Protein backbone atom coordinates (compact mmCIF):
# COMPACT_ATOMS: atom_id res chain seq x y z
CA UNK A 1 0.00 0.00 0.00
CA UNK A 2 1.37 3.41 -0.97
CA UNK A 3 1.70 6.18 1.64
CA UNK A 4 -1.19 8.00 -0.09
CA UNK A 5 -3.49 4.96 0.04
CA UNK A 6 -2.58 4.29 3.67
CA UNK A 7 -3.22 7.89 4.64
CA UNK A 8 -6.59 8.01 2.85
CA UNK A 9 -7.73 4.78 4.53
CA UNK A 10 -6.71 6.15 7.93
CA UNK A 11 -8.37 9.51 7.25
CA UNK A 12 -11.60 7.79 6.22
CA UNK A 13 -11.91 6.35 9.72
CA UNK A 14 -11.14 9.77 11.20
CA UNK A 15 -13.86 11.33 9.04
CA UNK A 16 -16.33 8.65 10.15
CA UNK A 17 -15.56 9.28 13.82
CA UNK A 18 -16.02 13.02 13.27
CA UNK A 19 -19.48 12.29 11.86
CA UNK A 20 -20.30 10.31 15.01
CA UNK A 21 -19.21 13.28 17.13
CA UNK A 22 -21.43 15.50 15.02
CA UNK A 23 -24.36 13.19 15.62
CA UNK A 24 -23.83 13.61 19.38
CA UNK A 25 -24.13 17.36 18.84
CA UNK A 26 -27.32 16.92 16.81
CA UNK A 27 -28.82 14.78 19.56
CA UNK A 28 -27.87 17.35 22.20
CA UNK A 29 -29.83 20.01 20.34
CA UNK A 30 -32.89 17.93 19.54
CA UNK A 31 -33.60 14.95 21.79
CA UNK A 32 -31.09 14.68 24.64
CA UNK A 33 -32.65 14.94 28.12
CA UNK A 34 -31.59 18.15 29.84
CA UNK A 35 -30.13 16.27 32.78
CA UNK A 36 -27.56 14.61 30.51
CA UNK A 37 -25.63 17.83 29.77
CA UNK A 38 -22.62 17.17 32.02
CA UNK A 39 -22.31 13.57 30.87
CA UNK A 40 -22.57 14.66 27.23
CA UNK A 41 -19.74 17.09 27.89
CA UNK A 42 -17.56 14.17 28.98
CA UNK A 43 -18.61 12.15 25.94
CA UNK A 44 -17.80 15.02 23.57
CA UNK A 45 -14.46 15.56 25.30
CA UNK A 46 -13.62 11.87 24.89
CA UNK A 47 -14.48 11.97 21.20
CA UNK A 48 -12.40 15.10 20.68
CA UNK A 49 -9.49 13.49 22.48
CA UNK A 50 -9.63 10.51 20.12
CA UNK A 51 -10.00 12.72 17.03
CA UNK A 52 -7.18 15.03 18.03
CA UNK A 53 -4.91 12.04 18.68
CA UNK A 54 -5.68 10.62 15.24
CA UNK A 55 -5.14 13.94 13.48
CA UNK A 56 -1.77 14.47 15.17
CA UNK A 57 -0.56 10.86 15.16
CA UNK A 58 3.14 10.49 14.16
CA UNK A 59 2.27 8.17 11.26
CA UNK A 60 0.18 10.93 9.65
CA UNK A 61 3.28 13.11 9.44
CA UNK A 62 5.31 10.16 8.15
CA UNK A 63 2.78 9.44 5.42
CA UNK A 64 2.66 13.13 4.47
CA UNK A 65 6.45 13.22 4.20
CA UNK A 66 6.34 10.20 1.90
CA UNK A 67 3.84 11.66 -0.57
CA UNK A 68 4.87 13.75 -3.58
CA UNK A 69 1.71 15.75 -4.33
CA UNK A 70 2.86 16.48 -7.89
CA UNK A 71 2.46 12.79 -8.77
CA UNK A 72 -1.25 12.85 -7.84
CA UNK A 73 -4.24 13.80 -9.97
CA UNK A 74 -6.31 16.91 -9.23
CA UNK A 75 -8.53 15.08 -6.75
CA UNK A 76 -5.57 13.57 -4.92
CA UNK A 77 -3.84 16.94 -4.74
CA UNK A 78 -7.00 18.52 -3.32
CA UNK A 79 -7.28 15.75 -0.72
CA UNK A 80 -3.69 16.37 0.30
CA UNK A 81 -4.25 20.12 0.51
CA UNK A 82 -6.99 19.58 3.07
CA UNK A 83 -5.15 16.91 5.05
CA UNK A 84 -1.92 18.90 5.17
CA UNK A 85 -3.80 21.99 6.34
CA UNK A 86 -5.74 20.05 8.97
CA UNK A 87 -2.62 18.27 10.22
CA UNK A 88 -0.65 21.51 10.46
CA UNK A 89 -3.42 23.15 12.48
CA UNK A 90 -4.05 20.14 14.71
CA UNK A 91 -0.39 19.72 15.63
CA UNK A 92 -0.22 23.33 16.78
CA UNK A 93 -2.98 22.83 19.36
CA UNK A 94 -2.06 20.80 22.46
CA UNK A 95 -4.22 17.73 22.97
CA UNK A 96 -5.13 18.79 26.50
CA UNK A 97 -6.39 22.14 25.21
CA UNK A 98 -8.49 20.56 22.45
CA UNK A 99 -10.08 18.16 24.93
CA UNK A 100 -10.69 20.89 27.48
CA UNK A 101 -12.38 23.06 24.85
CA UNK A 102 -14.67 20.23 23.74
CA UNK A 103 -15.72 19.52 27.33
CA UNK A 104 -16.23 23.19 28.22
CA UNK A 105 -18.18 24.18 25.10
CA UNK A 106 -20.55 21.24 25.50
CA UNK A 107 -21.35 22.41 29.04
CA UNK A 108 -21.40 26.08 28.01
CA UNK A 109 -24.02 25.36 25.38
CA UNK A 110 -26.39 24.12 28.08
CA UNK A 111 -25.64 27.11 30.30
CA UNK A 112 -26.28 29.44 27.38
CA UNK A 113 -29.69 27.85 26.78
CA UNK A 114 -30.61 28.25 30.46
CA UNK A 115 -29.38 31.85 30.60
CA UNK A 116 -31.22 32.67 27.38
CA UNK A 117 -34.44 31.28 28.83
CA UNK A 118 -33.96 33.41 31.95
CA UNK A 119 -32.74 36.53 30.09
CA UNK A 120 -29.73 36.54 32.40
CA UNK A 121 -26.40 37.29 30.72
CA UNK A 122 -24.68 37.45 34.12
CA UNK A 123 -25.44 33.75 34.61
CA UNK A 124 -23.72 32.93 31.33
CA UNK A 125 -20.81 35.37 31.52
CA UNK A 126 -18.48 33.25 33.73
CA UNK A 127 -18.52 30.24 31.42
CA UNK A 128 -18.26 32.48 28.36
CA UNK A 129 -15.20 34.06 29.93
CA UNK A 130 -13.68 30.59 30.17
CA UNK A 131 -14.53 29.85 26.54
CA UNK A 132 -13.01 33.13 25.37
CA UNK A 133 -9.84 32.50 27.36
CA UNK A 134 -9.41 29.01 25.89
CA UNK A 135 -10.19 30.22 22.36
CA UNK A 136 -7.59 32.96 22.72
CA UNK A 137 -5.12 30.32 23.88
CA UNK A 138 -6.00 28.18 20.88
CA UNK A 139 -5.80 31.19 18.55
CA UNK A 140 -2.35 32.08 19.85
CA UNK A 141 -1.16 28.53 19.19
CA UNK A 142 -2.56 28.59 15.65
CA UNK A 143 -1.43 32.11 14.82
CA UNK A 144 2.19 31.49 15.89
CA UNK A 145 2.76 35.21 16.38
CA UNK A 146 0.22 36.37 13.81
CA UNK A 147 -3.30 37.72 14.21
CA UNK A 148 -5.46 35.51 16.46
CA UNK A 149 -8.69 36.27 14.66
CA UNK A 150 -7.18 35.60 11.23
CA UNK A 151 -6.05 32.22 12.53
CA UNK A 152 -9.58 31.42 13.70
CA UNK A 153 -11.09 32.45 10.37
CA UNK A 154 -9.17 29.67 8.63
CA UNK A 155 -11.43 27.08 10.28
CA UNK A 156 -14.43 28.58 8.49
CA UNK A 157 -13.15 30.45 5.42
CA UNK A 158 -9.62 29.36 4.47
CA UNK A 159 -7.65 32.05 2.72
CA UNK A 160 -9.47 35.11 4.03
CA UNK A 161 -8.43 37.67 6.64
CA UNK A 162 -10.20 39.99 9.03
CA UNK A 163 -8.82 42.99 7.14
CA UNK A 164 -10.28 41.75 3.83
CA UNK A 165 -13.66 41.19 5.43
CA UNK A 166 -13.55 44.58 7.13
CA UNK A 167 -12.96 46.28 3.78
CA UNK A 168 -15.86 44.44 2.16
CA UNK A 169 -18.19 45.08 5.08
CA UNK A 170 -17.22 48.74 5.26
CA UNK A 171 -18.33 49.10 1.64
CA UNK A 172 -21.65 47.40 2.42
CA UNK A 173 -22.60 49.14 5.66
CA UNK A 174 -23.44 52.66 4.39
CA UNK A 175 -25.41 51.34 1.40
CA UNK A 176 -27.45 49.05 3.62
CA UNK A 177 -28.00 51.72 6.25
CA UNK A 178 -29.23 54.27 3.69
CA UNK A 179 -31.53 51.79 1.96
CA UNK A 180 -32.87 50.64 5.31
CA UNK A 181 -33.70 54.22 6.30
CA UNK A 182 -35.52 54.85 3.02
CA UNK A 183 -37.53 51.63 3.27
CA UNK A 184 -38.56 52.18 6.88
CA UNK A 185 -39.80 55.65 5.97
CA UNK A 186 -42.02 54.23 3.22
CA UNK A 187 -45.54 52.83 3.53
CA UNK A 188 -45.72 49.57 5.46
CA UNK A 189 -46.63 46.27 3.81
CA UNK A 190 -49.57 44.06 4.81
CA UNK A 191 -49.10 41.64 7.72
CA UNK A 192 -50.27 38.14 8.55
CA UNK A 193 -53.16 37.81 11.00
CA UNK A 194 -54.30 34.96 13.17
CA UNK A 195 -52.50 31.90 14.48
CA UNK A 196 -50.99 29.02 12.54
CA UNK A 197 -51.18 25.45 13.79
CA UNK A 198 -47.78 24.01 14.70
CA UNK A 199 -48.42 20.58 13.18
CA UNK A 200 -49.59 22.19 9.94
CA UNK A 201 -46.48 24.36 9.87
CA UNK A 202 -44.24 21.32 10.23
CA UNK A 203 -46.16 19.43 7.52
CA UNK A 204 -45.79 22.30 5.05
CA UNK A 205 -42.19 22.76 6.18
CA UNK A 206 -41.36 19.18 5.18
CA UNK A 207 -43.15 19.72 1.86
CA UNK A 208 -40.97 22.77 1.25
CA UNK A 209 -37.86 20.76 2.11
CA UNK A 210 -38.75 18.22 -0.56
CA UNK A 211 -39.67 20.99 -3.00
CA UNK A 212 -36.12 22.31 -2.73
CA UNK A 213 -34.63 18.90 -3.38
CA UNK A 214 -33.92 17.65 0.14
CA UNK A 215 -33.65 13.86 0.08
CA UNK A 216 -35.69 12.68 3.06
CA UNK A 217 -34.32 9.15 2.62
CA UNK A 218 -30.96 10.56 3.71
CA UNK A 219 -32.21 13.23 6.09
CA UNK A 220 -34.88 14.30 8.55
CA UNK A 221 -36.51 17.49 9.85
CA UNK A 222 -36.75 18.08 13.60
CA UNK A 223 -37.32 21.03 15.91
CA UNK A 224 -34.63 22.90 17.85
CA UNK A 225 -34.20 26.23 19.62
CA UNK A 226 -31.73 27.35 16.97
CA UNK A 227 -32.25 25.89 13.43
CA UNK A 228 -29.20 24.13 12.02
CA UNK A 229 -27.97 21.50 9.57
CA UNK A 230 -25.79 18.59 10.64
CA UNK A 231 -23.91 15.83 8.87
CA UNK A 232 -22.74 15.13 5.35
CA UNK A 233 -23.04 12.53 2.62
CA UNK A 234 -25.88 10.10 3.28
CA UNK A 235 -26.92 11.31 6.74
CA UNK A 236 -27.71 15.03 6.65
CA UNK A 237 -30.22 16.29 9.21
CA UNK A 238 -31.87 19.68 9.59
CA UNK A 239 -33.90 21.40 12.28
CA UNK A 240 -36.38 24.24 12.22
CA UNK A 241 -38.63 25.99 14.74
CA UNK A 242 -42.23 27.14 14.88
CA UNK A 243 -43.98 30.32 15.99
CA UNK A 244 -47.79 30.32 16.24
CA UNK A 245 -48.11 33.84 14.80
CA UNK A 246 -45.18 33.77 12.34
CA UNK A 247 -45.07 30.68 10.09
CA UNK A 248 -42.43 32.35 7.91
CA UNK A 249 -40.00 31.71 10.74
CA UNK A 250 -40.54 27.99 10.27
CA UNK A 251 -40.74 27.94 6.48
CA UNK A 252 -37.72 30.07 5.70
CA UNK A 253 -35.61 28.51 8.44
CA UNK A 254 -36.38 25.19 6.77
CA UNK A 255 -35.52 26.42 3.27
CA UNK A 256 -32.31 27.99 4.60
CA UNK A 257 -31.19 24.76 6.28
CA UNK A 258 -32.15 22.75 3.19
CA UNK A 259 -29.67 24.91 1.26
CA UNK A 260 -26.95 23.70 3.62
CA UNK A 261 -28.20 20.12 3.57
CA UNK A 262 -28.61 19.93 -0.21
CA UNK A 263 -25.00 21.06 -0.58
CA UNK A 264 -23.85 18.16 1.58
CA UNK A 265 -26.18 15.62 -0.04
CA UNK A 266 -25.19 16.62 -3.58
CA UNK A 267 -21.42 16.34 -3.20
CA UNK A 268 -19.94 13.70 -5.49
CA UNK A 269 -20.39 10.34 -3.75
CA UNK A 270 -16.82 9.44 -4.71
CA UNK A 271 -15.72 11.93 -2.04
CA UNK A 272 -17.79 10.33 0.76
CA UNK A 273 -15.91 10.25 4.10
CA UNK A 274 -12.92 12.10 2.66
CA UNK A 275 -11.86 15.72 3.18
CA UNK A 276 -13.54 16.62 -0.13
CA UNK A 277 -16.85 15.12 0.99
CA UNK A 278 -18.11 18.21 2.78
CA UNK A 279 -18.68 21.87 2.00
CA UNK A 280 -15.45 23.70 1.27
CA UNK A 281 -16.11 26.62 3.62
CA UNK A 282 -18.84 28.21 5.67
CA UNK A 283 -18.98 31.16 3.28
CA UNK A 284 -19.70 28.87 0.33
CA UNK A 285 -22.07 26.87 2.53
CA UNK A 286 -23.92 30.03 3.47
CA UNK A 287 -24.13 31.05 -0.19
CA UNK A 288 -26.25 27.96 -0.78
CA UNK A 289 -28.54 28.44 2.20
CA UNK A 290 -29.04 32.13 1.47
CA UNK A 291 -29.70 31.77 -2.26
CA UNK A 292 -32.21 29.00 -1.52
CA UNK A 293 -33.90 31.09 1.17
CA UNK A 294 -33.80 34.53 -0.41
CA UNK A 295 -33.13 34.89 -4.12
CA UNK A 296 -35.17 31.77 -4.87
CA UNK A 297 -37.48 31.31 -1.88
CA UNK A 298 -38.44 34.98 -1.44
CA UNK A 299 -38.70 35.77 -5.16
CA UNK A 300 -41.97 37.10 -6.54
CA UNK A 301 -42.42 33.98 -8.64
CA UNK A 302 -41.91 31.45 -5.84
CA UNK A 303 -43.89 33.38 -3.23
CA UNK A 304 -46.82 33.38 -5.64
CA UNK A 305 -46.80 29.58 -5.47
CA UNK A 306 -46.24 29.58 -1.70
CA UNK A 307 -49.22 31.90 -1.27
CA UNK A 308 -51.45 29.19 -2.75
CA UNK A 309 -49.90 26.52 -0.55
CA UNK A 310 -50.50 28.56 2.58
CA UNK A 311 -54.09 29.31 1.64
CA UNK A 312 -54.72 25.61 1.11
CA UNK A 313 -53.14 24.82 4.48
CA UNK A 314 -54.37 27.65 6.70
CA UNK A 315 -57.29 29.26 4.89
CA UNK A 316 -57.58 33.07 5.06
CA UNK A 317 -54.69 34.74 6.89
CA UNK A 318 -55.27 38.40 6.10
CA UNK A 319 -53.37 38.79 2.81
CA UNK A 320 -55.44 39.76 -0.21
CA UNK A 321 -53.39 38.50 -3.14
CA UNK A 322 -50.00 37.19 -4.31
CA UNK A 323 -48.49 40.66 -4.77
CA UNK A 324 -49.38 41.64 -1.22
CA UNK A 325 -48.05 38.29 -0.02
CA UNK A 326 -44.72 38.88 -1.79
CA UNK A 327 -44.41 42.25 -0.06
CA UNK A 328 -45.37 40.64 3.26
CA UNK A 329 -42.72 37.92 2.92
CA UNK A 330 -40.12 40.60 2.20
CA UNK A 331 -41.34 43.21 4.66
CA UNK A 332 -38.72 45.28 6.46
CA UNK A 333 -39.52 45.91 10.10
CA UNK A 334 -37.69 46.68 13.29
CA UNK A 335 -36.58 43.52 15.03
CA UNK A 336 -33.91 42.12 17.27
CA UNK A 337 -33.28 38.60 15.98
CA UNK A 338 -30.65 37.92 13.31
CA UNK A 339 -32.20 34.67 12.10
CA UNK A 340 -35.57 36.40 11.62
CA UNK A 341 -34.17 39.51 9.94
CA UNK A 342 -35.09 40.45 6.38
CA UNK A 343 -32.48 40.41 3.63
CA UNK A 344 -31.91 44.13 3.90
CA UNK A 345 -31.11 44.28 7.59
CA UNK A 346 -29.58 40.83 8.07
CA UNK A 347 -26.03 41.86 7.26
CA UNK A 348 -26.16 44.72 9.75
CA UNK A 349 -26.73 42.10 12.46
CA UNK A 350 -23.71 40.14 11.25
CA UNK A 351 -21.41 43.16 11.07
CA UNK A 352 -22.23 43.93 14.70
CA UNK A 353 -21.15 40.46 15.76
CA UNK A 354 -18.05 40.52 13.57
CA UNK A 355 -16.76 43.67 15.21
CA UNK A 356 -17.58 42.50 18.75
CA UNK A 357 -15.98 39.10 18.44
CA UNK A 358 -12.84 40.56 16.88
CA UNK A 359 -12.64 42.87 19.89
CA UNK A 360 -13.11 39.92 22.27
CA UNK A 361 -10.33 37.97 20.60
CA UNK A 362 -7.94 40.94 20.50
CA UNK A 363 -8.55 41.66 24.18
CA UNK A 364 -10.01 45.10 23.46
CA UNK A 365 -13.39 44.01 24.85
CA UNK A 366 -13.91 42.11 28.11
CA UNK A 367 -16.71 39.57 28.48
CA UNK A 368 -17.98 41.56 31.47
CA UNK A 369 -18.56 44.52 29.12
CA UNK A 370 -19.97 42.50 26.21
CA UNK A 371 -23.68 42.98 26.93
CA UNK A 372 -23.30 46.75 27.27
CA UNK A 373 -21.17 46.90 24.12
CA UNK A 374 -23.77 44.87 22.23
CA UNK A 375 -26.61 47.09 23.40
CA UNK A 376 -24.73 50.29 22.55
CA UNK A 377 -23.84 49.05 19.07
CA UNK A 378 -27.36 47.80 18.40
CA UNK A 379 -28.83 51.17 19.41
CA UNK A 380 -26.39 52.95 17.11
CA UNK A 381 -27.05 50.66 14.11
CA UNK A 382 -30.79 50.09 14.45
CA UNK A 383 -31.98 53.17 16.30
CA UNK A 384 -33.73 51.54 19.27
CA UNK A 385 -32.73 49.77 22.46
CA UNK A 386 -32.45 46.03 23.12
CA UNK A 387 -35.30 45.10 25.47
CA UNK A 388 -33.92 41.85 26.94
CA UNK A 389 -30.84 39.66 26.75
CA UNK A 390 -32.51 36.89 24.74
CA UNK A 391 -33.16 39.50 22.04
CA UNK A 392 -29.60 40.73 22.30
CA UNK A 393 -26.33 39.21 23.37
CA UNK A 394 -27.84 35.81 24.26
CA UNK A 395 -29.76 35.19 21.05
CA UNK A 396 -27.07 33.17 19.21
CA UNK A 397 -25.52 29.86 20.23
CA UNK A 398 -22.21 30.41 18.41
CA UNK A 399 -20.03 31.94 21.11
CA UNK A 400 -21.12 29.40 23.70
CA UNK A 401 -19.69 26.60 21.54
CA UNK A 402 -16.54 28.52 20.65
CA UNK A 403 -17.37 29.39 17.04
CA UNK A 404 -15.36 32.61 16.88
CA UNK A 405 -14.73 33.55 13.26
CA UNK A 406 -17.97 31.93 12.08
CA UNK A 407 -20.27 34.98 12.04
CA UNK A 408 -18.66 36.91 9.14
CA UNK A 409 -19.15 33.92 6.85
CA UNK A 410 -22.90 34.63 6.95
CA UNK A 411 -22.42 37.95 5.20
CA UNK A 412 -19.67 36.57 2.99
CA UNK A 413 -22.16 33.89 1.98
CA UNK A 414 -24.66 36.60 1.05
CA UNK A 415 -22.00 38.22 -1.12
CA UNK A 416 -21.25 34.89 -2.80
CA UNK A 417 -24.98 34.27 -3.29
CA UNK A 418 -25.32 37.64 -5.00
CA UNK A 419 -22.65 36.65 -7.53
CA UNK A 420 -24.18 33.21 -8.11
CA UNK A 421 -27.70 34.58 -8.49
CA UNK A 422 -26.63 37.08 -11.14
CA UNK A 423 -25.11 34.27 -13.20
CA UNK A 424 -27.99 31.86 -12.52
CA UNK A 425 -30.48 34.35 -13.95
CA UNK A 426 -28.49 34.51 -17.18
CA UNK A 427 -28.03 30.74 -17.36
CA UNK A 428 -31.74 30.02 -16.73
CA UNK A 429 -33.64 32.93 -18.35
CA UNK A 430 -37.08 31.33 -17.80
CA UNK A 431 -36.43 30.60 -14.13
CA UNK A 432 -39.43 32.57 -12.89
CA UNK A 433 -41.80 30.52 -15.03
CA UNK A 434 -40.63 27.41 -13.20
CA UNK A 435 -40.63 28.97 -9.74
CA UNK A 436 -44.19 30.19 -10.22
CA UNK A 437 -45.19 26.52 -10.47
CA UNK A 438 -43.24 25.58 -7.34
CA UNK A 439 -40.53 23.97 -9.48
CA UNK A 440 -37.12 24.87 -8.07
CA UNK A 441 -35.27 22.17 -10.02
CA UNK A 442 -33.75 24.42 -12.72
CA UNK A 443 -32.20 26.58 -10.01
CA UNK A 444 -31.18 23.84 -7.61
CA UNK A 445 -29.74 21.65 -10.37
CA UNK A 446 -27.63 24.58 -11.64
CA UNK A 447 -26.30 25.11 -8.13
CA UNK A 448 -25.72 21.37 -7.74
CA UNK A 449 -23.75 21.11 -10.98
CA UNK A 450 -21.77 24.33 -10.60
CA UNK A 451 -21.11 24.46 -6.86
CA UNK A 452 -22.34 21.59 -4.72
CA UNK A 453 -21.03 18.52 -6.53
CA UNK A 454 -17.45 19.77 -6.13
CA UNK A 455 -17.46 19.63 -2.34
CA UNK A 456 -14.00 20.64 -1.20
CA UNK A 457 -12.29 20.11 -4.55
CA UNK A 458 -11.45 23.80 -5.03
CA UNK A 459 -10.58 26.63 -2.65
CA UNK A 460 -13.61 28.68 -1.53
CA UNK A 461 -13.15 31.76 -3.69
CA UNK A 462 -12.14 29.62 -6.67
CA UNK A 463 -15.38 27.65 -6.24
CA UNK A 464 -17.45 30.84 -6.47
CA UNK A 465 -15.36 32.39 -9.25
CA UNK A 466 -15.66 29.27 -11.42
CA UNK A 467 -19.42 29.03 -10.87
CA UNK A 468 -20.28 32.71 -11.26
CA UNK A 469 -17.62 33.73 -13.76
CA UNK A 470 -16.52 36.66 -11.61
CA UNK A 471 -14.28 37.43 -8.68
CA UNK A 472 -16.40 37.66 -5.50
CA UNK A 473 -17.67 41.19 -4.98
CA UNK A 474 -20.36 42.81 -2.87
CA UNK A 475 -21.64 44.75 -5.93
CA UNK A 476 -24.13 42.13 -7.29
CA UNK A 477 -25.68 41.68 -3.86
CA UNK A 478 -26.08 45.40 -3.30
CA UNK A 479 -27.56 45.87 -6.79
CA UNK A 480 -30.03 43.06 -6.14
CA UNK A 481 -31.11 44.49 -2.78
CA UNK A 482 -31.52 48.02 -4.16
CA UNK A 483 -33.62 46.80 -7.07
CA UNK A 484 -35.78 44.45 -5.02
CA UNK A 485 -36.62 46.73 -2.12
CA UNK A 486 -36.95 49.86 -4.22
CA UNK A 487 -39.58 48.02 -6.27
CA UNK A 488 -41.47 46.60 -3.27
CA UNK A 489 -41.50 49.90 -1.39
CA UNK A 490 -41.89 52.11 -4.48
CA UNK A 491 -38.84 54.22 -3.65
Image (cartoon, rainbow, N blue to C red):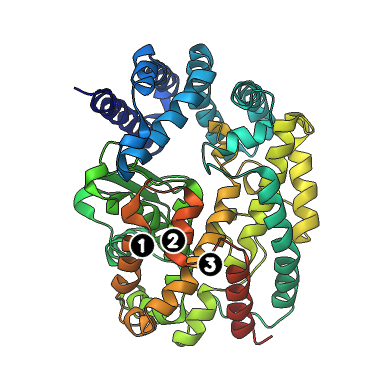
Q: Is residue 268 left or right of residue 344?
A: left
Instruction: Please tell me whether mark 3 sits on a helix, a strand or a loop.
Output: helix
Dot 2 crowding, Cα within 10 Å, few <14, some 14–19, many 20+: some
Tally of numbered discs: 3
Which quarter of the rendering shows the C terminus?
bottom right
Picture disc at residue 450: 1
Picture disc at residue 418: 3
Give the CA separation, mark 3 to mark 2. Answer: 14 Å
Give the CA separation, mark 3 to mark 1. Answer: 15 Å
Image position of 452 with respect to 292: above or below: above
Instruction: Please tell me whether mark 1 sits on a helix, a strand or a loop.
Output: helix
Look at the numbered discs 3 and 2 and tell me whether their residues touch, using CB distance below 8 Å: no
Residue at image x 51%, y 53%? 461
Image position of 97 with respect to 346: above or below: above
Image position of 167 with respect to 140: above or below: below
Picture disc at residue 466: 2
34, 281: nearer the viewer: 281
- Asked whether residue 163 appears in the rendered view, the answer is yes
Instruction: Please tell me whether mark 2 sits on a helix, a strand or a loop.
Output: helix
Q: Position of residue 109 (x, y in %)?
A: 51, 31
Give the CA separation, mark 2 to mark 1. Answer: 8 Å
Look at the numbered discs 2 and 1 and tell me whether their residues touch, using CB distance below 8 Å: yes
Mark 2 or mark 1: whose residue is earlier in sequence: 1
Amino acid sequence: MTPYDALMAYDRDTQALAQVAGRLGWDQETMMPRGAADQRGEEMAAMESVLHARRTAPQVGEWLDGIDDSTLDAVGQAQMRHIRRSHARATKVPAALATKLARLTSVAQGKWAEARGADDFAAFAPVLQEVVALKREEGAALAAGGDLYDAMLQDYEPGTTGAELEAMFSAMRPVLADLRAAVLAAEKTASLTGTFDEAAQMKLSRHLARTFGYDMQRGRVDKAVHPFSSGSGNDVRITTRTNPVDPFNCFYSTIHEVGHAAYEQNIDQAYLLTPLGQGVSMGVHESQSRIYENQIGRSRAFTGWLFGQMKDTFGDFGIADADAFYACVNSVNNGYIRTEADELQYNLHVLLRFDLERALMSGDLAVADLEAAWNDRFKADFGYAVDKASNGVLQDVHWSVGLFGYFPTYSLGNVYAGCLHQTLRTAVPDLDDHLAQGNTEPATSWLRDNVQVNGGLYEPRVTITMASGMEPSEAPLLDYLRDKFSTIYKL
